[in-house]
Structure formats: structure tokens, C-alpha cells
Amino acid sequence: VSVDSVSHIDYPALQQHAGIRAVVFDKDNTLTAPYDESSVHPRATVGLQHALATFGPSQIAILSNSAGTTRDDPGFQQAQAIEEQLGIHVIRHEEKKPGGLE
């Protein structure tokens, strides 16, 4: 699926018709500007709100090549800042995407 922004995704349809039970977002250039831990990009705000309303915060996560990686985020300080600011879990991983989910 390719869309201009996460705000163009019909999350209830994904859940009801495709059986999707959770969503993992990239951070940079998807939810935030690159390397910005503090705020959701205005174009993504509505989409993130709809995803959270549809799936619930426990079913939403972020997988990033910056925040949450052992090499680029030592001590996971960026990941923790994002979790506190956005209320969304950041997956900790050693390998950059497309890996990192093992």
C-alpha cells in the first residue's frame, strides 16, 4: 500500500475487512520529521489518532532505524522520549530495517 500520509489509511476497514490486529509505524518521514522525537508531523496526526482509536495503544508500535536501535540510540534515550511524548511503544532492536524483528 502506498499513500501520501498515514492519515489516508482507512484503519477500521483494515481491521474489519482484512483482519489486521495491530500496526507498526516507521518514525522518520512517516510519523515525525527525521530525528524529531517531540511531535507528530501535522500530516500524520489524524492518521495516528485514527489508528489509536481503532486498534488501541497496546496494538500500535514504532520500528525506527534511529530510535530504539542499539547502535544509534545507546541506552534507548530517544525511544524513551518518544514513548513518553507520543504514548506509543518503540521496538528495541539491534539490526536496522528491514531486519530488527527477530
Image (tube, grey):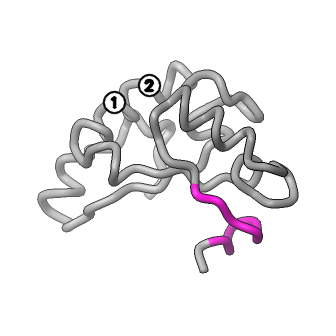
Query: Under tag 1, what secondary structure?
Result: helix
Label at residue 49: 1
Cβ atoms at labels 2 and 1 below 8 Å apart: yes
What secondary structure is found at the residue carrying circle 2? helix
Furthest residue in direction left, as rendered? 16
For the residue marked with disc 1, what is the amino acid? Gln
For the magenta stretch, what is the residue range?
91-100
Residue drawn at 59 percent across, 50 percent down: 26
Dominant secondary structure, magenta: loop
Q: Position of residue 51 (x, y in %)?
A: 32, 41
Please state which amino acid type lies under the numbered disc 2. Thr
Residue 99 image-quadrant placement: bottom right
Please tell me how crowded label 2 is: few (under 14), some (14-19), or many (20+) other residues with Cα within 10 Å. some
Q: Which residue is mark 2?
A: 45
Which residue is located at x 76 percent, y 69 percent? 94
Residue depicted at x 21% and y 66%: 18
Residue 97: image location, x then y, percent? 70, 66
- x, y percent for residue 80: 64, 39
Q: Is residue 99 magenta?
A: yes
Q: Residue at x 60, y 80 (%)?
A: 102
In front: 56, or 54?
56
Mark linked to residue 27: none
Location of residue 62 with respect to 78 vertically, above or below: below
The residue at the far front in this view is: 75
Mark 1: few, some, or many residues within 10 Å (few <14, many ≥20)? few
Residue 82 position, x and y percent, is: 60, 35
